[in-house]
Amino acid sequence: MKTLKSYVCEAWYEAPEGHVPLRDPSTEEVIAQASTAGLDFAATLNHARTVGGSSLRKLDVAERGQVLNAMSKALHACREELIDLSMKNTGVTRKDAKFDLDGATGTLAYYGHLSKELGGEMILDGEGVALGRSARFWGQHVKIPLRGAALLINAFNFPAWGFAEKAACAYLAGVPVIIKPATSTAMVAERCVEILVEAGVVPEGALSLVCGSTGDLVDRLGSQDVLAFTGSAETALKLRSRPNLLALSTRVNIEADSLNAAVLGPDVEPGSESWNLFLRDVSLEMTQKTGQKCTAVRRILVPADRMGEVAEALGERLGAVVTGDPRHESVTMGPLATADQLADTLEGVARLSESARIVHGTGERIDGTGAAAGKGYFFGPVLLQADDARKAQAVHEREVFGPVSTLLPYDGKAAEAAALVGLGGGCLVTSIYSDDQAWVEEIVPAAGSWSGRLYLGSTKMAAQAPSSGVALPQSMHGGPGRAGGGQELGALRGLDLYLHRVALQGSRSMITRLSGARGDS
Ligand code: NAP
């Protein structure tokens, strides 16, 4: 059995005690253990801030972009090994493992390429402006890397992409990172860091890894540090209320859970391209990574007169899903990642059943194809249906982090659909399927304020659409309200979390020269 190590102060640390087990979710076999007992978190943070910060700031933006490209290549070179490890540790299918890993390398490469857009060495924020009677007294906003370190706490479901998308932005901005993966799936993140360290592609001190509990690390974060968190709303609330973070105004970004909605427009006819796109997206978003995706569709809003046809068509697609050990050739959906996830999903479906009835699936644990009877955290897709969307309170409140979604009828009006989207309290993504321009124009502003991203499915984009749940680095990822209120990615906007904005006021010539200056160490 493997004992996971942390990587701190340029050395691997193996804890002597206090280990928690990591299991293969298909077999329940213990495959690794992790602990941070005895780890010196003060030294870890200090090393990242001083050595890591300094070595990153010595590089200009283009050089930091090259670091990201080298990271992407080093991880891509080990793609097959990482896919196998991900299938074993997280229980995902090969396809789903690729989604995580290719997402990681793709996002690193995207930001590597984007460094070219930044040009100079200091990042300018907009145009300069004359502040006096003439241009001699000049104002210019510039963005400067924070002098601390970024603690990247991630959820279990994206062990590679989770840290890579955050690190890409932090590094390009010039801020070192301490990666803290979810313990249950930390094998993938640990191996990724090992690959990067062995490849020697990351500047000294810029990369640390904590496998296991964070000890007192969060309490040590100061005003120049960043906490970038992805996980449940419950953990997010605990973390963001830490007195030191509040007292020192430490930057905190939260990506939490979300009751994303897919809305079928009243104009979409069965069999049309938009109809097929809607069905493809919803069934994929319910089952990809066994529904353990923050952007998965949890609520399906359907015009009441189309409900029967949608339930039948979706049921057919879900009926084709084969749940089991992802190493078995016929399996298309793996188990849930942990025993806790299974217990939470069972409890969640029971809660949803208070206001909706199951129309596809059992809502019970099942035996998996290719797995021993009684072993593994297997749970088949479950589709529920509510008769009254407004009364189905649990459906708008309880995120079931598994292959579970609920059909909700509405009257076909854009205003009502948007109001139902809003009952979720804030989503990462809302997908809307319609070719009716006027209807879309009505729903976009009304549903948009509840959503981080609006995915507008239509006949014209169907052939190129990746599916609503894909967080592309060009577009912002994050959502208002219960989704955490955070913002990640979105091209250069993704760097803002790690940059401090300063208003420079002075002579135009001096400010112009400063804008081209290399940051000090
Ligand atoms: P979680 O239980 O909240 O854990 C998330 C992370 O926080 C893990 O790394 C966990 O470490 C760590 N953590 C827990 N308690 C902590 C504490 N007191 N101090 C410091 N770190 C702590 O969430 P999860 O079960 O891994 O992930 C599922 C949830 O994440 C779902 O609700 C999902 O919607 C959400 N999610 C959101 C997004 C998004 O982008 N918005 C993406 C993916 C997932 P340990 O594993 O060591 O406990």
Image (spheres, rainbow, N blue to C red):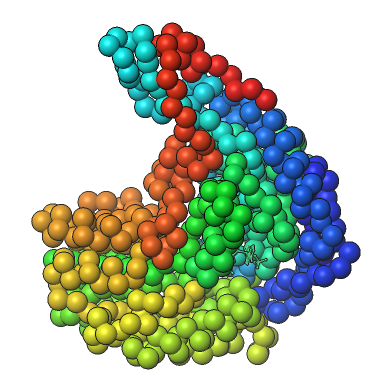
Q: Position of residue 53 (x, y in %)?
A: 67, 35
Nearer to me, 444 or 287: 444
**Is residue 323 placed above or below 216 in the rendered structure?**
below
Q: Quadrant of residue 30?
A: bottom right
**Residue at screen point 25% across, 81% down:** 389
- Give the residue drawn at x 70%, y 30%: 55
Inspect this view and state whether residue 5 appears: yes
Is residue 192 in view from this perspective?
no
Report the number of discs.
Answer: 0
| Rendered-image quadrant of the N terminus | bottom right
- Residue sitting at the far right: 16
- Residue at 25% from the left image edge and 72% from the top image edge: 420
Q: Is residue 463 left or right of residue 85?
A: left
Taking 453 as reference, is 367 left or right? right
Residue 278 position within the rendered picture, expressed as x and y whole percent measured from the top left: 29, 66
Q: Is residue 310 left or right of residue 254?
A: left
Residue in front for this viewpoint, 21 or 326: 21
Check the image and report above or below for 250 versus 439: above
Q: Residue 29 at x, y = what percent? A: 75, 77
Position above or below: 138 against 342: above
| Residue occupying image coordinates x 27% and y 85% | 391
Task: Place residue 109 in its image quadrant.
Answer: top right
276 horizontally vs 126: left or right:
left
Question: Residue 41 appears at what percent x and percent y?
Answer: 76, 53
Ligand 1 lies in quarter: bottom right
Image: 267 above or below 223: below
In the displayed image of the protein, which residue is found farthest to the left?
438
User: Quadrant of the image for the C terminus?
Assistant: top right
